[in-house]
Each structure stands twice: as structure tokens, then as C-alpha cells.
Amino acid sequence: MNRNRKLIIILIATILLICVSFQASYGEPGIPIPSIIINADEDQSPREVASSLEILFILTVLTLVPSILIMMTCFTRIIIILSFVRKAISTQTTPPNQVLIGLAIFLTFFIMAPVGSEINEKAIQPYINEEISQEIALENAMKPVREFMFRQTRSKDLALFVDISNSEIPNNIEDIPSKALIPAFIISEIKTGFEVGFILFIPFIVIDMVVASTLMSMGMMMLPPVMISLPFKVLLFIMVDGWNLIIKSIIMGIK
């Protein structure tokens, strides 16, 4: 009874405090609220129009940065391989998705650092210093990216999209449009990631088969083999320093 009475007293006191606070704030002089106005005034010079268009272009590029990171770099291959590793070990949520994606992103930054340095040297800095135009900056920025994608793209995949686009047969790689290069690069990266994932699955499948056969011979068919094979697969992965080998293979496999 005393406990309920204390709770009622605390509740009444809280309500009174809130009412007093509202009354005090209502009695205070009004606080000015800033107003935000968006105008579309007429520009006085062509330079102002160009600056507005440049800002719009930069905002558009920023919205496409995630797609560029995923589709035009080695991120796709890395995340596929890391996902296959987790599946092969049979650890469903370890490492978690955030860790795998973070590792893939930083490995992508590490591998693509030479390409980024070349873009900064030949495109971004000259454009900032007003030494080249926007069109030349975009062209200079795409050159190292295209060279990287050409090194990773299979000729068969590239020929597929060139044929589908009904474009003329290019005389050299410079004549191949980016609209055919980018999807060819993506499917090449996906195929490479699946090939590496298949190779990674082989030793762990052998462990699963040995454990399953052992349990069946012992008559323990109701016991899930994954429960027994998981510690052995984790132990094997630790003994061979699996993460070191996988990361090294990924980096060395990207030319």
C-alpha cells in the first residue's frame, strides 16, 4: 500500500513539474525562428550559371559514388570471396556482414590506391587549378579506371556486350565504349569470385564428408554433422592462417 502511494505521489509531482515548465516557457518572450527561403534568381553572368551547373554535377556524382565503388572496382570480387569463406566454414553470422563489407571496402581502397593517385594527379588537381576543362578532366579520370577494368575483364565477356550493343568492331581497346566495358567487367569479376569460392569450398567439404561418414558408421544419424565438423573447420582455418592466405591471394590475383 505504501509503495503504491509513493508511486502516485511521484507521478503527481512529475505532472506538476511538466505543467510548471510549460507555463514558464509559454510566459517567456517569443524566440525568433529563422526562415529558409529558396529562390531561383536570374544569374548576372555566364560564370554564375557554370558554377551552378558544376555544383549540380558534383552532387550528382556524389549520389553515384556507391555504385562506382561497387561496380567499377574490385569490391564485387572481394565481397563474393569473403562471403564464400564464411559459407564454407559454416559460420552463418561470423564474421558479421558489417565486418565483411568494411574489410572489402578497405581492401578495395588499398588495391585501387594507384588508380586513385593517377586520377588525382592527372584529372582532379589540374581541374582544381583551372588548367584543364571539365570534359578533359572526366576523360583523364576515366583512363586509369578503364585500364584497370580492361586488365580484369575477359575477352569473351567483352565481346558479348560489344556484339549485343550492335556497335562497330573496334580496332583497339580505346574504341570500346564504357557502356560495354563496365557490364563485361562486372560479370568477369562475379565469375572470378565464384571460381575462387569453389576452390575454397573443397577442403571444408572434405571435412564435412569425413565427419558425416564417421557419424553414420557409429549410428549417430540424428546428430547434425555440422555441429561436429564446425570446430574442425575452424581449427583448420586457424592452423593454415586462412585470413592471411585469402587476403594475400585476393591482392595478388588482381593485376
Image (cartoon, rainbow, N blue to C red):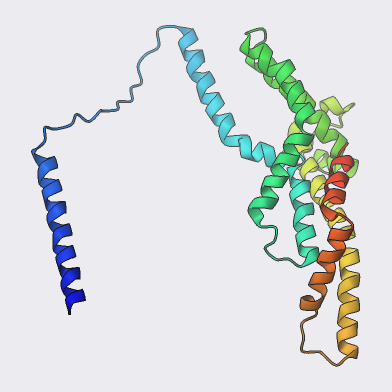
What residue is rendered at 65% in x and 55% in y? 97
Question: Which picture quadrant has residue 171?
Answer: top right
Question: x%, y% of residue 215?
Answer: 86, 86
Q: Nearer the viewer, residue 207 or 137?
A: 207
- How many marks the image carries: the answer is 0
Question: x%, y% of residue 183?
Answer: 75, 42
Specify the quadrant that holds the C terminus: top right
- Up the image or down, 196 lies above or below 109; here it is below
- Up the image or down, 44 lies above or below 80; here it is above
Question: x%, y% of residue 74?
Answer: 77, 41
- Asked whether residue 176 is in view, the answer is no
- Up the image or down, 207 lies above or below 27; here it is below
Would residue 34 appear left or right of 112 to someone viewing this image? left
Question: Which picture quadrant has residue 186?
Answer: top right
Q: Which of 49 and 65 is in front in this view?
A: 65
Question: x%, y% of residue 209?
Answer: 89, 76
Q: Which residue lies furthest to the front in this view?
A: 2
What residue is rendered at 85% in x and 55% in y? 242
What residue is rendered at 40% in x and 7% in y? 44
- Up the image or down, 210 lies above or below 59; here it is below
Q: Which of 33 and 248 is in front in this view?
A: 248
Specify the quadrant that holds the N terminus: bottom left
